[in-house]
Amino acid sequence: MKRHLGAVLVASLLGGISLSGCEAVESIGKSIESMNWGPKTAQPQNAAEQTPMKAGGVPMVAELPANCPQIKVLDDLANITQFTNPKSPRSEEMIAAASFASLDANCSVAPSSVTLEITLDFEGQVGPVGKKNQSSEANFAYPYFLSVITPSGQILSKDVFALSMIYSDGKDMVHKQDRLRQTIPLMAGQAANQYQIVIGFQLSEDELAYNRASAK
């Protein structure tokens, strides 16, 4: 099943930065849609449309010092919802869903690298189908990615992680927190804040279409 990072083809994967517990990805396949990544002083005009909103209308972007890379969760990829029939999603046929609830990070800039400690909070909900099939415990796993974008807008690395949501004792909703560490090497003359880190769920075509339809 094809899973999407966006809609513009990428010619090649420039390089990889390993993260503990990650699944190595040899090829990106598709890049983030219509994103002209650059320094924080030159953000795309439609950046707000590409950034999911927390409760209260606050974009899901990590609050970091100006000399650090920007970290954000992509709007279209901030949720994943699974149905019995993905091509014709109906609420009564929902299996389970997960979404990014919050994003936090710390940044440490050195002369030749920048290291980020990233904290991600997730919320999960089991649907009617998942609940019906639930005995004493139900376990659902969802892939999500972290990509580093270079100053020129190329994808430097992509790492994929598995988010596990376990429902027990009749619970309909669960909370999960993941902590990640990302180190980006800096070449001579490069500034850490010229890089971007983007995060989202690894979605199928149907899952992406559902998110976009729900946002309208």
Image (tube, grey):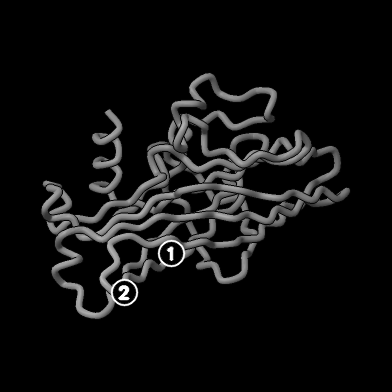
- Which residue is at 42% across, 46% downward? 5
Pinpoint residue 214: horizontal percent, then vertical percent: 26, 36
Pinpoint residue 46: horizontal percent, then vertical percent: 49, 22
Q: Nearer the viewer, mark 1 or mark 2?
A: 2
Of 11 and 53, nearer the camera is 53
Choose top left, top right, bottom left or bottom right for residue 19.
Answer: bottom right
Choose top left, top right, bottom left or bottom right for residue 17.
Answer: bottom right
Q: Neighbour class for label 1 at 10 Å: few (<14), some, many (≥20)?
A: some
- Which residue is at 44% across, 27% downward? 49
Q: As displayed, is residue 24 above or below residue 69?
A: below
Q: Neighbour class for label 2 at 10 Å: few (<14), some, many (≥20)?
A: some
Rounded to the nearest angstrom, the CA distance separating label 1 from label 2 is 16 Å
The answer to whether residue 82 is left or right of residue 105 is left
Pinpoint residue 166: horizontal percent, then vertical percent: 36, 71
Considering every residue shown, the one lying at the far right of the view is 111
- What residue sits right under mark 2 in the picture? 168
Work out which quarter of the rendered image holds the N terminus and state it.
Answer: bottom left
Q: As displayed, is residue 98 above or below residue 36?
A: below
Count the numbered circles shown: 2
Please tell me the numbered disc located at residue 163.
Answer: 1
* Mark 2: secondary structure: strand
- Identity, as a three-letter code, of the amino acid under mark 2: Ser
- Which residue is at 69% across, 23% downward? 41
- Which residue is at 59% across, 55% downward? 119
Of 185 and 193, nearer the camera is 193
Work out which quarter of the rendered image holds the C terminus and state it.
Answer: top left
